[in-house]
Amino acid sequence: MRNNISKKIIDDIVFFRQPIKTKILTSDDDIIEIVLQYTNGIRKKNDIIVLSESPVAITQGRAIREDKIKVGLLARLLWRGVKRTSYGVGLRSETSMQCAIDECGRLRIIIAAIIGFLCKFIGKRGIFYKIAGKQAALIDAAHTSPVPPYDKTVIKGPLHADEICNRIKLITGNETAIMDINNIGGSWVIGKSPGIDSELLEKIMMDNPQGQQSELTPICLVREKTND
């Protein structure tokens, strides 16, 4: 692997992680073609291909310009009730809340908001997202990404994540995962090919070797050290 590798040791096993830089992706790109192009000559037989969720979503046309989002009354009422967190804005903005409503449906968001609000009184948090669903949790608010033009877009979560991973596995032979990772230890597999151990991969990627700023490294190869 090349010089920008890092390593992670899990249960005395060494894993190398190599972020791969690409161009700025757009909705005109095919994420599978991007993977094939930028990993050609680099990936090896037993490497795991890890894709960041937002770039995958961008290639699906799911980055929505903030000034194109028509914010309704419900979004204006609900966004202020979302707790500010250290890892991002999430739905604590009118436009990202509106995208959650568009994605999940008004009724589901209303039910999630009511039950989530009531559960706060008994010390249970995170109920809103459990009811609203995964797509609500995956939305990145505008001004989250530092990379133009996506600094002014709300990015919804990718669709058909398992299907994409399975197609890449079929073409390359490499197990593949799409992940949502932040800089404070949040690491989640949101799509995968069948051979992926989600719990292990989340530990391997927990320190976010791909970075969270303008690195332009939507792909990472993960390789277990062997004695070969």
Image (cartoon, rainbow, N blue to C red):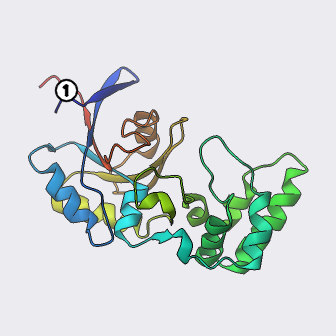
Please, is residue 25 above or below residue 18 in the view? below
| Image location (x, y in percent) of residue 100 | 62, 70
Q: Residue furthest right?
A: 121
Q: In the figure, is residue 125 to the left or right of 171?
A: right
Q: In the figure, is residue 24 to the left or right of 76?
A: left
| Residue beneath disc 1 | 226
Q: Quadrant of residue 57?
A: bottom left
| Image location (x, y in percent) of residue 150 | 44, 60
| Image location (x, y in percent) of residue 158 | 44, 65
**What residue appears at the point 71 percent right and 79 percent down from the top-left corner?**
72
176 vs 217, nearest the viewer: 217
Please, is residue 94 above or below residue 218 in the view? below
Please, is residue 160 above or below residue 219 in the view? below
**Residue 170 visible in the shown view:** no
Quarter of the picture holding the N terminus: top left
203 vs 2, nearest the viewer: 2
Please, is residue 227 above or below residue 200 in the view? above
Give the amino acid at mark 1: Thr
**What residue appears at the point 82 percent right and 64 percent down from the top-left corner?**
115
